[in-house]
Image: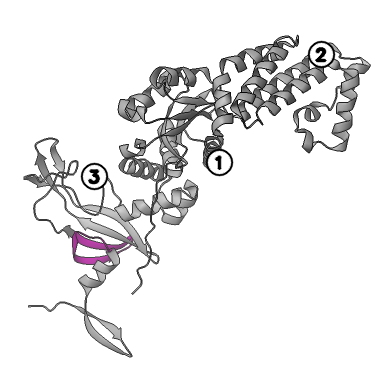
Amino acid sequence: MQSVPRLHVLAGRRWVAGLSVQEVLGRLVSIQGLSVRGAKLEPRGLVVQVRPRQRKPRCGVCGRPSPGYDTNPERLWRHLAVGQTILWLHYTPRRVRCREHGVRVERVPWAAHDSSFTHAFEELVAWQAQRLDKSSICRLLGINWRTVGTIIQRVVEERLSNSRLEGLQIIGVDELAWSAGHKYVSLVVDHLRSRVVWVAEGKSEQTLDSFFDELGGERTKELTHATMDLSAAFSKAVNKRAPHVRKTFDRFHVQKLANEALDTVRRQEMRRLAGSQEGQALKQSRWALLKNPWNLTVRQEEKLSELKKSNQTLYRAYLLKESLARGMDYVQPKRAAEHLDKWCQWASHSKLEPFVRLAKTIKRHKDGIVAYVETGLSNGVVEGINNKIRAIIRRAYGFRSLKALMAMILLCCGGMEFTPPLPVAA
């Protein structure tokens, strides 16, 4: 009988025998639930022959023990690398007859069903995808660009748990344009944990309805607040599906509408006074009108002083914009509500059509604006996550597939944590 080859190991200052090749290979592979049978060097790397320790095969889909059916051809699974040598796991998988899923390939402890990569390798890819672009991952690991996307989608599908919707109390809702041609995705963010919990295509009322369908009635009752922009679609969905939730519209979106109304008045005045001396005075006035008073330069302050004398219409629009901003500074909700009522009355009689329309919008959403003053909740967390997603889209030079984008959003912004394979200290 041929003896098992042994390796010499350094103990103290002397080399002693006692470590078998199987033990060395098992340490290199470092996967629970398999036994190493042998190995051979090939041009592609070190091919390690393995087999599961469990004797009775299990269904690759559900993991239920099932009777054997036949065997599949030999297969290789890509594992991690040792230095510049790639480890491959070699095994001839059995097929089983599952009473629920029919004839399926057996489950192996080192890889997911229908995957050609080990769990450890996919963990490494997912960890790198949270930090690097796909091209860099391809160069580091020597895999295809499309393969990276497939691994990301599979890992996200495995890690995405319905428990992410548990304990939601304060949510933020927003939409994001991800491609040209008015292509949008809607996001639902958990304010308390600062992570995306749900993403879907579109930005309509029906889109948010599907979120509440998945959330369910019991978990919907636990919601207390929802921050959002002044989108009518999202507001209708919340009113219909969760009428008890306090909608909050933060000052960023309110002041954005005021700035847009002011800029519309400025452009109207520019067209009305084109070619006149009064029209020349309006040039280079945009940022003097839109900036906060404490951020104005000396030249911009002078420009505002000129506008106060030369164009009362535009200066009145500027005062309306600043008055609305001051109303959002109140700490007491009652005083903020009173200020908004007076502001809407002023804007409605200002004879400035953009501000007349804005006054109607403020009246419709007054309760949500006052809720911002009362609670201090804003959509800042959602906007920050949106900026991160935009950076991901730019880093990837866009996405062709919406499914790939949604998987990347959940991977990078969904609170998923991955541990790269690290050396174990002796």
Which range is magenta?
Answer: 30-50
- Report the amino acid beneath label 3: His
Q: Which residue occupies the extreme right position in the image?
A: 277
Classify residue 285 by image quadrant: top right
Local secondary structure at mark 2: helix
Give the main secondary structure of the magenta stretch: strand
Q: Nearer the viewer, residue 74 or 321?
A: 321
Above or below residue 36? Residue 57 is above
Q: Position of residue 370 (x, y in %)?
A: 58, 25
x, y percent for residue 325: 69, 27
**Depth order, front residue of 118/299:** 299
Tell me the mark number nearer the camera, choosing from 3 and 1. 1
On the image, numbered disc 3 is attached to which residue?
113
Distance from disc 3 to disc 2, alpha carbons, whole Å, reads 66 Å
Q: Position of residue 182 (x, y in %)?
A: 53, 22
Residue picked out by circle 1: 391
Residue 30 vs residue 311: left or right?
left
In the image, residue 97 lies in the stretch drawn in magenta: no
Specify which label sits upstream in the sequence, 3 or 1.
3
**Quadrant position of residue 154:** top left
Residue 52 visible from this viewpoint: yes
Disc assigned to residue 271: 2
Horizontal relation, residue 394 to residue 214: left or right: right
Q: Few, some or many C-alpha atoms within 10 Å of disc 3 (few <14, some 14-19, many ≥20)?
A: some
- Can you tell which quarter of the image residue 401 is in? top left
